[in-house]
Image: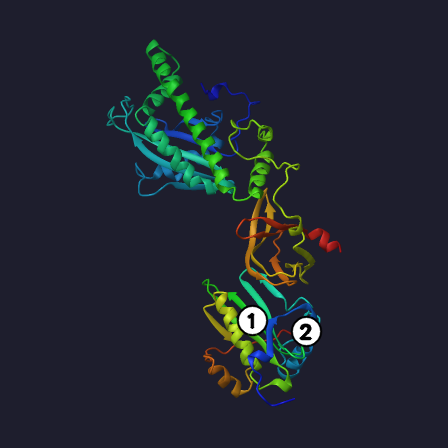
Amino acid sequence: MSDNPIIQEDIIIRNYRTSDYKATLEILKDLQKQFDIGLDEQKWKESSGLRQFKPNLKRITLIAEIKSTGEIVSMGMLEAVKNNIGQYIGYLNNWVTKKGFIGKGVGKILADKAIQILQSWGCENVRINMAYEGDRKLIDVFSHLGFQPIIIVLEKKFNKNE
Amino acid sequence: MFDAHKSKSSDKNPFEELAVVYVLYFDETHGHTPILIYPDDRYKNDKKFMRPIKYHPIWFLGGGSNALDHIDLEYKGYTFFGKKFLTKSKRIKRRAGLEDETPETIVIILSLPNKLEVFGDDLIQDLTKKIESEFGDNLFEIIESEIASSSLIKSPKIYKIIEKGDPIKNKLLKTIDDACKDFFRNAVKDLDTSSIKMQKAIAYLALKGMDISHIDSSNYKDSFSNIKLFDPTEKNNINVLDINIFSIKQITLSENSSEIEILVKNNTDKEINGIIVVITHVKEYFEKEIMTENIDVWFPNEELVFISPIFPQIDEYLLFIMKEDSNEKLLSKKVDLNALKKK
């Protein structure tokens, strides 16, 4: 695999299809290993990545596919959630790039597309949920796109046996 | 001439249970007193029936309630819209300090089932305007006639007062009847943005016991509404190829049964623009909208997931897919939770 950066013309950014299920599951498993995103394989169904609509929420999973090979190299979920004061807030979640493609600009192309979509949905702003102990470099990468850290989210996991 | 007193119980008024109009005045000795009740006067003296009318907050508002459009009271599934105004009077008052010219305090109350309260604002304005402009100068004569009718001994003079007041009362009743008929005819027409709504209107009226057989005939010009039943022999402009544009691929209940997930597929190889997806449930004859989603672009062969919350005691939900520009229905599906749970 070459170390050259991937340009927009090399990849197709599209929405998730049920045929992407296996590939996305593998990517999510990798993410789970690294950051414990709480993936439950039983709950990530074939239809989970499809465009979803429910009251006060829109969700889509974006896929980055290499044009020449059809390989899925990156994925990310975006959501528009209506808050208590009627504003739509966009979220980018579970943003993952396959190991061999990290640092080649695929994530940025995907994120640019995601931001365009969230804007077209009428979102007032976009937030990215990142691992607290994630790579500091990632924050720098996103700061070039205009993202600034503003909040820290604390989470408590419920023990299923409790 | 229209005469409510001549109506028999078999001639059920179509607006009974839809709209009731009370015209009342403030009597200096008896307080809040009805002049007439449309469409049926028979409960005029029924204390239970008249309770929300006698104690409606409109009575406690100063005369000529111009500052507020109208005052509403919700009571046992009905909304009572009240409006008050003062009119000319030459009636001899029965309380010291009041002169013959002291204006009459007239209150108009319109009651509608809560489900139809959306019509209240316009109808109460319409009725008040008509009554005030057409009968403002004569209402005191109906009041005089009502007071005269209740007296035990009727002198020739009293009979004369009654004879003068009764035709005005009948005319008032006819005006209210016409106003209601006109209003509901236009309201149904205005709201009929799609043929589905027409059918719903018919269904509601039929469920309320209204005879709708006349609208099935060609001569429905005298009907209160322009609504017509579907003619199954009539061919619409629906393209047969359109019928299977979308299909339901899967309907699932979420694990804790708090949501239903409906998976819908665009079966064509074409991008489809301008689609509306609506999920509703039916409660007491009325559809309640849960969610409406505008799908700007539905990609070829794309499957979309629509997730609707489930409400307690509601087991049936409806999904509609329509064209945004014409409201043409492309797919409708009833989701029965009981059937889903059995699977």
Which quarter of the rendered picture does the N terminus of chain A lie within? bottom right
| Residue B201 figure quarter | top right
Q: Which mark is residue A61?
A: none
Give the camera-side residue of B91 and B112: B112
Q: Which mark is residue A40?
A: 2
Which quarter of the rendered picture does the C terminus of chain A lie within? bottom right
Extreme-right residue of the structure: B343
Extreme-bottom residue of the structure: A3
Q: Chain of mark 2?
A: A
Q: Chain of mark 1?
A: A
Q: Earlier in the sequence, mark 1 or mark 2?
A: 2
| Crowd around label 2: few <14 · some 14–19 · many ≥20 (10 Å) | few
Q: Name the spot of residue B35 as percent of width and height, x first.
A: 39, 26
Q: Name the spot of residue A70 as percent of width and height, x first.
A: 67, 77
Name the secondary structure under disc 2: loop
Q: Nearer the viewer, mark 1 or mark 2?
A: 1
Q: Which mark is residue A78?
A: 1
Residue type at the position of mark 1: Leu
Name the secondary structure under disc 1: strand
Q: Residue at x 48, y 20 (%)?
A: B5
From the viewer's perspective, tell me whether residue B167 is left or right of residue A137: left
Q: Residue at x 51, y 69 (%)?
A: A118
From the viewer's perspective, tell me whether residue B119 is left or right of residue B235: left
Q: Name the spot of residue B276 as percent of width and height, x first.
A: 56, 55
